[in-house]
Image (spheres, rainbow, N blue to C red):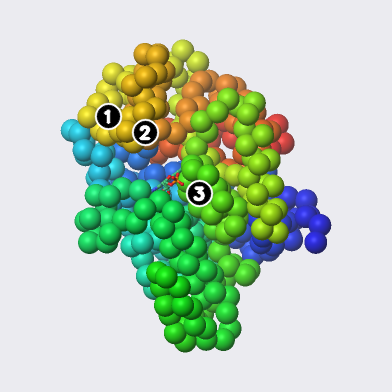
Amino acid sequence: MPAAKPGTAGHICGNRILDTPATRSFDRHSLKLGLFGLNCSGGLSATLTPERWEGTWAQNLAAAKMADAAGLDFLLPLGRWKGYGGETDHNGGSLETLTWAAVILAATENIMAFGTVHVPLFNPVVAAKQMVTADQIGAGRFGLNIVCGWNVGEFNMAGVEMNAHEARYEQGQEWVDIVTRAWTSDAPFDYAGDHYSVTGALMKPKPVSKDRPMIVSAGNSDRGRDFAARNSDMMFTGIHTEVAEISTDIAALKSRAAGYGRDIGMFTNCYVVCRPTRREAEEYHDYYALEMADHEAVETLIDGRRRRGQFDELPEDMQRTLRQRAGGGNGAYPIVGDPDDVASLLIRLHEAGIDAFAMGFANYTEHLPYFRDEVLPRLEAAGVR
Ligand SMILES: Cc1cc2nc3c(=O)[nH]c(=O)nc-3n(C[C@H](O)[C@H](O)[C@H](O)COP(=O)(O)O)c2cc1C
């Protein structure tokens, strides 16, 4: 079936035809924007600044309503069970994402809310029911972000053994197979896998979203890309290359998805520092993400990279950049500058093939209004929103 123009009923995103009122609202913009990480203390910023994000429920609700009223497209929580330590125990306080999404959806009108679900920690049939509940509450605005997990401390905390990388994705495949069948099958079904066996599973009611809620999966590895190509409407992945190389990367992902008879879009994580002048933005970026960084938490954030031998060998200026990305955005891609800089970089990345930007702000409710008032009109004028 040919893809309709974005914004019209029947536009195809991934494998789904987006024709519920809510998913149409997600798809009304070519360049999609959302807030990322607001459910956790610190959000994406490992900083000691007094304005750092606490992540209380009251703050989450205020940010969600502000984002909804501003016309943003989605809210995406971090799936986090333990913090990164340091003076702030960065991300140590977190609101569980399916509970969070359900209430956010009840309190908003148009914006999508995702649950970020750790495969090994949630029984798939129970999770499918929790997600249907959220989708019903949001009249089709719920989305699933699948994470297969990486943090052994979080597994230990739940008393669940962390499998090797490949096995985590094999388990993820069984999990998503069961969840999607529960969402879509009108007859009871059995499933016998290596990780799960279910008998006579039948889910009522069904999701409000046509077919099923949108699925995003987060990962960077080749195996993670394959999992996304096979199962997800969007792959959620970081930018680790020059902008010029992004298109090639996305073309490879799309061709892999085509091998499964599917299409796939691209979600990325970023953080935004936008001030009236580039200099002010850079100064604030240096202030909160370097000088006032929670240095111990930053070291934990870059630990994985260090263990893979991808840190200590780097030149000092690159180490500084990576530390700043960790302090400013949990390692996400920095978008720093005046409103013209920010809008033009978002457009450039979008033209390279990125569909959706999951954004962190050092403080969501304090910093979103300037972005809303100055950057959104520029994106609208450019025709991408
Ligand atoms: C953009 C992005 C966001 C992620 N968000 C989370 C998260 O919220 N919680 C989590 O436990 N893991 C998160 N992950 C980790 C992945 O789900 C995955 O477990 C990890 O990247 C290891 O898989 P990989 O080797 O395929 O990259 C994220 C990864 C990426 C790339």
How crowded pointer 2 is (Cα within 10 Å; few <14, some 14-19, many 20+) is rated as few
Q: Quadrant of residue 96?
A: bottom left
State yes or no: discs 1 and 2 in contact (Cβ < 8 Å): no
Q: Quadrant of residue 329?
A: top left
291 displayed left or right of 239: left
* Amino acid residing under circle 3: Gly
* Amino acid residing under circle 1: Glu
Picture disc at residue 299: 1
Along the polypeptide, which appears first: circle 3 or circle 2? Answer: 3
- What is the secondary structure assignment of the residue under circle 2? loop
Quadrant placement of the N terminus: bottom right
- Does residue 59 appear in this view? yes
Q: Nearer the viewer, residue 59 or 211?
A: 211
Instruction: Check disc 3 and report the residue beneath it.
Output: 224
Residue name at image x 66 percent, y 41 percent: 252
Q: CA distance from mark 1 to mark 2?
A: 14 Å
Instruction: Check disc 2 and report the residue beneath it.
Output: 308
Residue name at image x 49 percent, y 82 percent: 190
Q: CA distance from mark 3 to mark 2?
A: 17 Å
Quadrant placement of the C terminus: top right
37 displayed left or right of 6: left
Q: Is mark 3 within 8 Å of ligand 1?
A: yes
* Amino acid residing under circle 2: Arg
How crowded pointer 3 is (Cα within 10 Å; few <14, some 14-19, many 20+) is rated as many
Along the polypeptide, which appears first: circle 3 or circle 1? Answer: 3
How crowded pointer 1 is (Cα within 10 Å; few <14, some 14-19, many 20+) is rated as some
- Tell me residue 246's x, y (percent): 62, 32
| Position above or below: 112 against 222 | below
